[in-house]
Image (cartoon, helix red, strand yellow):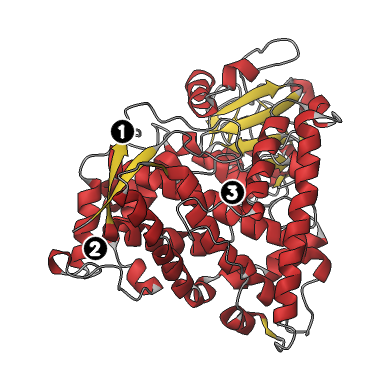
Amino acid sequence: MKCQFYLVGDDLSTAQSIDADPRWKFEDLQRAVGAVFHVALPTGISFHSDTETLSSVADILSAPTSPIGLRIDGNAVQTPQGPPGLPLVGSFYEIFPDHLGNHYRLFRKYGPVIKTTNMGKTTYLTDDPQVAAVCFAESAYMTKKINESHPLWGVKDNTAIFIGDTETENWRLAHKYLPPAMGPRAVRHYTGLMQDCARKSFPVFDELDARDESWNVYQYMVKLASQTIGSFSLGKDFHHFDTVDSPLHPIVTNIASLLSLNKKITARGEWYRHLPFGDPARLRHVQHTIYTLLQDAIDDVAAASSSTPDAPMHEAALSASCVVDYLLHAVDDQGHHFPPGLILANMLIVTGAGFTTTSALLSWLIYCLVTYDGVQDRLYAELLDHRIVGPNGSHRNQTTWTPDLAHSLPYLDNFIKETQRLHNASFQPGRTTKTDTILPGGYRLPADSVIIPALYAIHTNPKTWRDPFRFDPDRWGSDEVKHRHRCAYVPFATGPRGCIGFNFALLEVKILLAELVSRYEFVRDGLDAVEYDPEFQLIRPLNFYVRARRRV
């Protein structure tokens, strides 16, 4: 039978008729109504007459009043609120430079979904895990489509897995071929590489200790992380630890410039992006340079592996010398290769995303070691307990690492999780609405709207986390954490567009950090507050210095 419904908060004239079957379950009616009104999570729909809440299909279909009102999680539909902004610049000065702190403040003021405008662009953000779960699901309502309001608009490339749209054939192919190269079995294949890269850095850190010198943590963690990723992705030694003053490889410096310039440009509006000079011109030059450098590296691998036979993807992942080697020789079950024309752009992502996120995470891990009382001692004690460091320090940095060993250290695991909760490198995984969409809580977004699950705000949401700004690795064994919403902690995002390299990244930071802590005691140098870079695509510390004292 036909029944009319409207969204409470909208005019009665917007009511729509739906053919409802009296035999339906309540959930069936929720889904049917949700599909008509574009409610992303229909289980939150409740039905209301003028006088009462209707809790069964029979009550709804026999209600004397029409149309029936719909609420979402008990709320009327609403447009997300946000700061009113100023002419031209919008919310820019409400948000920058401390975008993490200011977004957190705006969530407390306006609610779990907020609207910001910035230089003509409108962006929505959420700190609600339930809303984030809707965003991360590729669905009839949400996808990753990089439009002019998306944080990655300046570097969009539909031939690459991270900076391209989901609903393309290129993304489907990349998502088919790349994950086997970074799955758990493939990562095991590269464990020795991680161990060797850590130990090759020791002569440099030993020399800095002998000189009694402090050093900028992020700069050296960029060297260490990119040395590892360069070997993994390109089979290339960047020579970052030949001497204390070895320069960064041009591939690394240009990728870092690419991310910095993109953040600056997208924060300043579409008009700025098209300028023929300044940062926009530099971004175009950097893009050309980095693609040239990467193509040379790919050609080197192709020449060195020209006699390597092709193999099924999962076999090739276990025998390849690096990711490029894998992509050149892996075939699917029909004997098809990954299209050669897609290798270049995807290697930019594997290389760039690999070292930029890991270097920032390693920096924040060392920050936590020297900032929060007792954690460095507890981590070192765990290394002693597991004989990674011998009794009384009798041997160190001699362990043959395996994934099983790295993942068997509970305090190390909890320490990394808590660091990622409070100091995650990534912060703005944007998604785009495919149609007018009503989110949990009743928030309505227009089609083609970009919404960002704000990871820092989600990870510190006081409705989810007890004492959210307290650094407490032990919380990870508590019932509080075990029963949290699955999207209350998403350092690598989640869903079909989640980070495909998380297996490699987690194993890498566990081995690198354990090797460093086995050998050195880290001590903070200076008392200045550590600042993060507001004009970079990731959250990285700028002015953080330590002494690494050789343990005896």
Label 2 element class: helix
What residue type is disc 1 on?
Asp
Q: Of marks 3 and 2, which one's residue comes earlier in the chain?
A: 3
Q: Of marks 3 and 1, which one's residue comes earlier in the chain?
A: 3
In the image, 226 versus 453, the foreground residue is: 226
Residue 77 image offset from top left, x and y in percent: 64, 26
Question: Which labelled disc corresponds to residue 27?
Answer: 3
In the image, 308 versus 106, the foreground residue is: 308
What residue type is disc 2 on?
Leu
For the question of whether residue 2 can be seen, the reply is: no
In the image, 481 versus 240, the foreground residue is: 240
> What residue sits right under mark 1 in the picture?
467
Horizontally, residue 393 falls left or right of residue 191, namely: left
Number of numbered callouts drawn: 3
Query: Which corner quadrant of the image does residue 407 belong to?
Result: bottom left
Q: Does the residue at mark 3 contact the one at mark 2 (Cβ under 8 Å)?
A: no
Horizontally, residue 188 falls left or right of residue 56, namely: left
> What residue sits right under mark 2 in the picture?
383
Q: CA distance from mark 3 to mark 1?
A: 36 Å
Label 1 element class: loop
